[in-house]
Image (cartoon, helix red, strand yellow):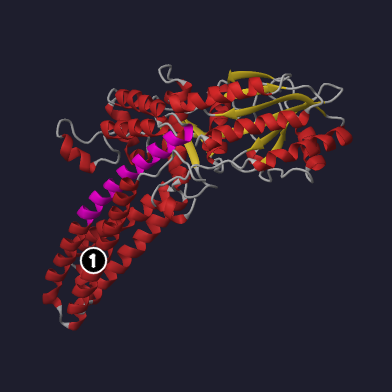
């Protein structure tokens, strides 16, 4: 926020940065080659639903768009305990690009409808042979990614997260401020 | 981006600008009159009084700005919490994390105050020292659902984003100096010695009384005007925070219902709690201390917060705005 906006108590809602999302397929290849982490084919978009018909119209349009888009994809809508909505897309494991394209479609529909500021994050999930789970989370407002590796209970595998940062640092813009790597416990699709 | 549902409220911006402009005018007029009065009489003692008032005012202002977070934490008895400090702290951190990611702002520290009052406030001069304090009463209240709690926190985060602590401290600076000046002038007159004695060295004793009197009068008038303007500014900033908070969550109605619940419970708070809560009042979500009973119009202009009706009206306008078909 600029000085004048602060002085006058005006907040300009943060607009999302959507383009970085297409860097994900490259990072997926790096992750598989370097750490044996493969995409599960699941990805989700998290947003804060605004009240009113205007938003729910757009939301149902998005759902319709996704479910008729590609034959293999399934779409699921869940609401988490914080009141945020997650649109989860399930694709086949090999078709990571189609998943990213679908996720991007959700973003652009919401942004085109004027609800860009309601977008929170996008998550794509990975796992390795030993069953370790990893989510790569994209923060719309920062235009950055960060890894999130939940273990049993509400614990994070920080070592794995930092290792991932080192691996994909060249492919993705990783959030430099570690305090913004917030946890999304129980995120659908992870 | 061409299309937005988040148009700024130009009326509110204009009124806030005007209030700050008037405060500036009062400040300039105050200093000008004092300098004129003093240079007309050529007295040193009056100058010393003003110098010390401004100096002490600056020290107080800067001090309260730098220690605002510590003062507020110790006054309210709040404890900083981490997400590991139990389920309540984890939930609070979860909500704040998400709101900060939505708003793209740095996360403030989070504290919980052991108080039965339903309230929350934010303090600290910048994003590093910012603290968001929530009372246990608010966290434990079964009437308040998660969305309403989130709306309250979004309102407080907007205060942090708008740097309201800094703006209001600077705005209060004028009032502090005028108040100090009145007090100094009064005491120096009361005890006769200090101010007059020094001036008395150059046979100018006769002029002392009127000068002090004028300074006193100017100080009182300035204090009164700036007090009203500061309260007006505070109300406008509350409306601005309501607005930003409602737009952040996209749920103006949740904030409206939270306001209704919280302000309804405020009147049931016992008197003892109210008095101890008074110094923090300006930063509270809903003022714990109500000025007037029936004389609504008069108590409104002294109030740090807008009336519930005014706040609800704005929120329903925002709700309409969000719902407009694009």
Q: Which residue is drawn at 36% across and 40% down?
A: B280
Q: Is residue B62 magenta?
A: no
Most foreground residue, A128 or B52: A128
Quadrant in which the C terminus of chain B appears: top left
**Left or right: where B107 falls relative to B222:** right
**Left or right: where B104 falls relative to B176:** right
Classify 10 Å Cα crowding around label 1: few (below 14), some (14-19), many (20 and above).
some
Q: Residue at x 33, y 54 (%)?
A: B171
Q: Mark 1 lies on which chain?
A: B
Q: Position of residue B199 (x, y in %)?
A: 21, 77
Q: Does the magenta stretch include residue B240?
A: yes
Q: Is residue B133 above or below residue B219?
A: above
Q: Position of residue B101 (x, y in %)?
A: 57, 37
Q: Where is residue A10 in the image (x, y as percent from the top left)?
A: 41, 47
Q: Where is residue A47 in the image (x, y as percent from the top left)?
A: 56, 29
> Could you tell me what secondary structure mostly forms the magenta stretch?
helix
Residue at image mark 1: B29
Residue interval drawn in magenta: B223-249
């Amino acid at each position: 926020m600029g000085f004048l906006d602060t002085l006058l108590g005006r907040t300009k809602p943060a607009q999302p940065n959507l383009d970085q999302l297409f860097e994900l397929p490259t990072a997926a290849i790096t992750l598989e080659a370097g750490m044996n982490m493969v995409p599960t084919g699941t990805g989700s978009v998290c947003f804060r639903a605004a009240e009113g018909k205007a938003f729910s119209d757009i939301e149902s349009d998005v759902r319709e768009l996704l479910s008729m888009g590609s034959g293999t994809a399934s779409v699921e809508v869940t609401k988490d305990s914080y009141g945020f909505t997650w649109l989860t897309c399930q694709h086949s494991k090999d078709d990571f690009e189609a998943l990213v394209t679908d996720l991007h479609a959700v973003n652009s529909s919401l942004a085109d409808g004027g609800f860009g500021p309601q977008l929170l994050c996008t998550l794509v999930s990975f796992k390795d042979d030993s069953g370790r789970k990893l989510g790569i989370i994209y923060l719309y407002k920062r235009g950055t990614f960060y890894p999130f590796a939940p273990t049993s209970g509400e614990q994070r595998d920080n070592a794995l997260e930092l290792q991932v940062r080192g691996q994909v640092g060249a492919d993705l813009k990783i959030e430099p401020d570690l305090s913004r790597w917030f946890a999304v416990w129980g995120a659908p699709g992870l | 981006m061409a299309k937005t549902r988040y148009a700024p409220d130009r009326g509110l911006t204009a009124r806030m600008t005007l209030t700050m402009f008037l405060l500036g005018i009062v400040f300039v007029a105050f200093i000008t009159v004092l300098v004129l009065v003093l240079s007309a009489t050529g007295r040193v003692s009056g100058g010393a009084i003003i110098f010390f008032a401004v100096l002490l005012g600056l020290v107080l202002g800067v001090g309260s700005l730098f220690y605002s977070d510590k003062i507020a934490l110790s006054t309210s008895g709040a404890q900083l919490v981490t997400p590991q400090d139990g389920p309540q702290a984890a939930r609070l951190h979860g909500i704040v994390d998400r709101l900060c990611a939505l708003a793209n702002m740095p996360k403030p520290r989070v504290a919980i105050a052991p108080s039965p009052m339903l309230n929350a406030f934010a303090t600290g001069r910048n994003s590093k020292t910012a603290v968001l304090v929530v009372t246990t009463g608010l966290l434990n209240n079964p009437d308040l659902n998660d969305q309403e709690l989130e709306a309250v926190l979004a309102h407080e985060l907007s205060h942090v984003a708008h740097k309201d602590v800094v703006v209001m401290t600077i705005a209060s600076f004028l009032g502090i100096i005028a108040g100090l000046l009145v007090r100094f002038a009064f005491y120096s007159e009361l005890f006769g010695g200090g101010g007059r004695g020094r001036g008395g060295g150059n046979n100018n004793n006769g002029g002392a009384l009127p000068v002090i009197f004028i300074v006193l009068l100017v100080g009182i008038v300035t204090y009164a005007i700036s007090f009203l303007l500061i309260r007006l500014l505070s109300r406008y900033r509350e409306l601005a925070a309501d607005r930003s908070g409602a737009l952040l969550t996209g749920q103006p109605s949740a904030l409206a219902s939270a306001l209704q619940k919280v302000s309804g419970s405020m009147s049931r708070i016992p008197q003892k709690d109210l008095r101890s809560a008074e110094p923090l009042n300006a930063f509270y979500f809903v003022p714990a201390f109500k000025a007037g009973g029936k004389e609504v119009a008069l108590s409104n202009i002294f109030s740090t917060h807008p009336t519930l009706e005014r706040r609800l009206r704005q929120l329903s306008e925002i709700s309409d705005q969000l719902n407009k078909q694009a």
